[in-house]
Image (tube, helix red, strand yellow):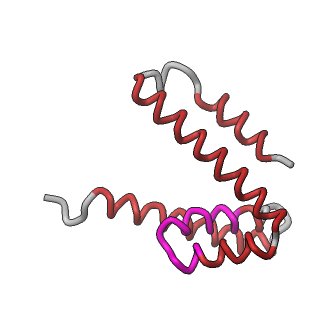
Amino acid sequence: MLPYRPSDLKRFAWIALGLLFLFLGVVGLFLPLLQGLLFLMVGLLLLSRHSRRARALLADIRRRHPKAARALDRLERSALRLRARIAREWRQGRLGGRPLWRGLRRWLRGLQP
């Protein structure tokens, strides 16, 4: 028997990924090569699923900055569409048949203003 449930490990992975993006965002604020705000927003989006504080901070950002709220909404919708597509491809057994990078590339192009 595993000491942790798979859902606990998945939750830990999401939190670790969110913290990694937050760290990259803070580093990106000081380095010109990284887009600091983008990494901070993605980190907050990832953490908002599991943290009340991150959810409250994200809601505050949405309230104060309507332009950022529209960008975050677009990012969330795109991520949900990509997740649904991956799940559909997985269920149909075609995940390896067609390269997903084409869809990912289109999704990333759609994020640009």
Question: Residue at 77% across / 56% down in the picture?
Answer: 71
Q: Position of residue 24 (x, y in %)?
A: 67, 67
Q: Position of residue 78 (x, y in %)?
A: 66, 44
Q: Position of residue 86 (x, y in %)?
A: 51, 35
Image side of residue 92 versus residue 107, left or right:
left
Q: How many numbered marks, from 0 up? A: 0
Q: Is residue 67 magenta?
A: no
Query: Where on the picture, by quarter, is residue 103?
Result: top right
Q: Which residues are magenta?
A: 39-55
Question: Residue at 70% across / 55% down in the picture?
Answer: 73
Question: Residue at 54% across / 41% down in the picture?
Answer: 83
Question: Residue at 58% across / 75% down in the picture?
Answer: 54
Image side of residue 91 versus residue 66, left or right:
left
Image side of residue 109 versus residue 46, left or right:
right
Q: Position of residue 14 (x, y in %)?
A: 48, 61
For the N terminus, give its image quadrant: bottom left
